[in-house]
Image (cartoon, rainbow, N blue to C red):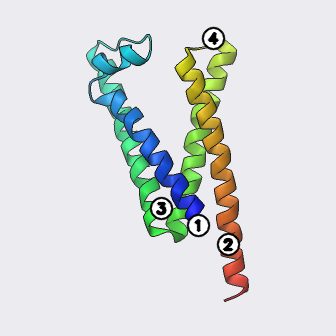
Amino acid sequence: MKLSRFYLIFSAAGLLPIAMSYGLDPNRILPKLFQFHPVEGDTVHVLRAIMGLYFATIILWLLGAIRGGSMMRTALISEISFMSGLAAGRLLDILLDGWPSPVLIAYTVAELLLAAWGVVCLRRFDGMQISAQAFP
């Protein structure tokens, strides 16, 4: 359980600055990280919506870490889905368009590792739940 809590909090803390880079001031922050200049109003609007989605996800992960139980299981599944989805999209992009910048390659590797770590945490969590039911 401690590993799962750490995993969720660690991931939430790591996602927070990424979320803020998308939405706080994308015209200033994103060009420093990527070759990306979101100058149009609708593009910034979409990036801020993504930031909001990331914040909502962070809240779910933190609630899972704090409350435990079924909320932790939900948070773990959410994180596995989130990281796997991001990694799958990035891998598809690599297949279709070639290699992105080094920072995006690092994101892909991190997302794959976090998804795998999440699977380990979920298996351990489910194993502990089964053991607790078998031996009340």
Spot occupied by residue 82 in the image (x, y as percentages of width and height): 55, 42
The mark found on residue 97 in the picture is: 4
Q: Is residue 106 visible?
A: yes
Q: Quadrant of the N terminus?
A: bottom right
Q: Give the Cα separation between the discs numbered 1 and 4.
A: 40 Å
Mark 1 or mark 3: whose residue is earlier in sequence: 1
The mark found on residue 65 in the picture is: 3
* Residue 50 image-quadrant placement: top left
The mark found on residue 1 in the picture is: 1
| Contact (Cβ within 8 Å) of mark 1 with mark 4 | no
Say which amino acid is labelled 4: Asp
| Position of 18 relative to 26 (above/below) | below
Give the structural element (helix, strand or loop) at label 4. helix
Spot occupied by residue 96 in the image (x, y as percentages of width and height): 66, 14
Q: Give the Cα separation between the discs numbered 3 and 2.
A: 16 Å
| Position of 24 relative to 5 (above/below) | above
Mark 4 or mark 3: whose residue is earlier in sequence: 3
Q: Nearer the viewer, mark 1 or mark 4?
A: 1
| Contact (Cβ within 8 Å) of mark 2 with mark 4 | no
The mark found on residue 128 in the picture is: 2
* Residue 84 image-quadrant placement: top right
Mark 2 or mark 1: whose residue is earlier in sequence: 1
Say which amino acid is labelled 1: Met
| Contact (Cβ within 8 Å) of mark 2 with mark 1 | yes
Give the structural element (helix, strand or loop) at label 3. helix
Residue depicted at x 69% and y 54% = 120
Q: Give the Cα separation between the discs numbered 2 and 1.
A: 8 Å
